[in-house]
Image: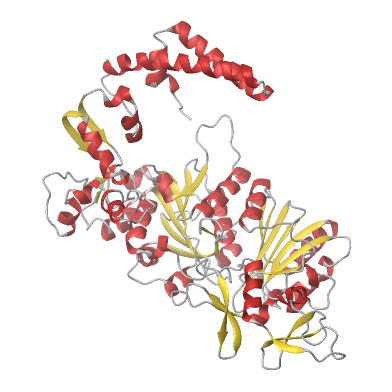
Amino acid sequence: MIKHRDLTSFYLAAKKRPELLQRYEQLRSEREKLRKSGRQKELARVEKELSYCRQEIRALERLVLGGAKAVGTTLSKSVVDEAVFLSRWDTVIVDEVSMAYIPHVVFAASLAARRIVLIGDFRQLAPIAMATNPLVQKWLKRDIFEKAGIVEAVDSGKDHPCLASLTVQHRMHPRISGFPNIRFYGGRLDDAPDVANNVDSIVNDEPFPGEPLAMFDLSGLDIGSCIQPNKSGSRFNLFSAFASISLASMSGKNNVAIITPYVAQGRLLKALISDLFPFKGDSSTPKCRASTVHKFQGSQSDLVIFDTVDSSGRPGTLVSSINESSRLINVAVTRARGKFILVCKRSYLEDRVSRNMPIRWLIQYIKEKGKHYRLLNALNLELTGQSANDYLVWLENEIEISSKLKEEIKKAKIIMGEFRSDWLTSEIGQAILEDLIKPDKKLVIKSNSASPLRGTSIEKNVIIKNFIPYSALLLINNKVIWCCAQVRGENRYLWVRYSGPKGVLTISGLLDLDLTSTAGNVVGLRDFVKNKCKCPSCGKPMIARLSKKGKVFLCCTTSPSCDGISWLDINIANEYLSFIEAHCPQCGGKLIAKNGRNGIFVGCSNFPECKTTFDLQDYL
């Protein structure tokens, strides 16, 4: 949406013909009414007349542009708009040129009569292109700085005749700017003398008053980051999103940014913001924004929270690839004016990412120059206090949790749950399970193993899921989400209760919590086999069982009357894995059945790059 449309060339041109502008606005209003009424013939007439009005106004645009001293436009519009590319300009200035395709920059240069000025930072985001062929690599995935030889000159410590470098920064607190200065700019960037004083009020604000640089560490929690295998392969993490939004809610500033490497996490954070930071008509600047790093290129915020997301499996290339992560992390850090907070699971990143990667450089820098806080300790310090509207509440008292959760389950009619088998067998898991299996509830359960539910009334409602990122998650009446993670090495759990409507809907979609299509379906391998395999002796259905050595075999359902028996065929196992759309939690590849030394097991189709495996007995 254009904030000042009267300054656009279209409206400046239209003002030269007031009667034409008035007619144009009338037609737009009439079009909206017709769209709602569904009167298609009249709508087509109005659309046609609107098109004629636009053509007349466009004809006047070139006159407006010809008389202007300065014109602002996008590179894309300069390519397609005759009013721009048929004119000649004394000087063409291209901003954020590091993200521009080289052919676009060359075209922009062709519009300049005297000079072209390219402004950008080749240490920040590069152009984006999905294809991988050599021509794309050469012309669309490199920026003009690299093509001109500037990057090579700077990397080798030489000057380049076409480069004028920024040497003094006026945005960031010196303890924030120190990181990119050392790691990305070779120590050439100085801080303006007054920059620390200018951001003093931000530094002294919550969270972590007095600290411009901090790490909020999720280590100690047994949590995982989820991959969307059937969509974009993007990642999200509920606990890091809840932690980030809790920190943002504590700030008194009106310019807070939560930046993440992943589109899925950005979508989740935006939904939480819609619930917790509702837009107010009298405020032109939202208190909090969230998106991927690319959306924040060229902007700045008082407080920046960088949510890294990754906490299980193989790290994503956005934090583990030297080329991609260098630019992404540089942009994320340099958006902050007075306070930068890194939200991460430090133990995981230090274990799974090389110390030569930028994310490890950032962790080490904050450990040396900033403050390190752990989420588990922060609860005691009330650093993650509940939001003003009670949509987001952190809970650790097991008695209080059990009481509140049981009360909500008791009143619930529809419940969707995802549980790890070890949680289901825990004391609190067993207590909650007693209330879940009441006959008055519509219930669907996903678990990494059906064993703890054998013999219960909900055995046939269990859906096997390879990877459960948290100890337990319940969606109650499609309105409230309870999520918990075990404190590693201890018999205690940290819970979050979330009831914001947009956040609940988004989490349901991301986790594929479907309360209608899966209820009552037989989805365990044991029952899948019963519908697929017949006894070779009597023709009755077969059932999958586990031998004393842990191998899955088939026997007749009428046993011991019939002694029909066979080993499970690998093709049936693969049919089942395809039926439940089993995907690897580490890399998103398909899971397939394989023959091993000890019988059939489940492994990733991306082997040997990914060596993830599961026991077939987990699917029974």
Residue 526, above or below 537: above
Task: Tell me which residue sits at (22%, 58%) in the image.
Answer: 186
Could you tell me residue 179's position as x and y percent?
32, 58
Q: Is residue 555 left or right of residue 395?
A: right
Q: Nearer the viewer, residue 340 or 16?
A: 16
Task: Tell me which residue sits at (68%, 58%) in the image.
Answer: 513
Q: Is residue 220 left or right of residue 407?
A: left
Residue 257, above or below 178: above
Task: Tell me which residue sits at (42%, 50%) in the image.
Answer: 293
Count how many numbered circles sit on residues in the image.
0
Residue 1, above or below 300: above
Q: Is residue 315 left or right of residue 392?
A: left
Query: Which residue is most to the bottom?
Result: 548
Could you tell me residue 521's position as x and y percent?
77, 65
Q: Quadrant of the C terminus?
A: bottom right
Query: Residue 96's quadrant in the figure?
Result: top left
Could you tell me residue 50's position as x and y percent?
51, 16
Query: Which residue is most to the top?
Result: 19
Q: Nearer the viewer, residue 90 or 522?
A: 522
Would residue 389 be seen by someone viewing this image from the given angle?
Answer: no
Could you tell me residue 28's position as x and y percent?
55, 18
Residue 459, above or below 294: below
Q: Is residue 274 left or right of residue 112?
A: right
Q: How is the image coloured?
A: secondary structure
Would residue 289 be seen by someone viewing this image from the given angle?
Answer: yes
Task: Tell me which residue sits at (50%, 61%) in the image.
Answer: 309
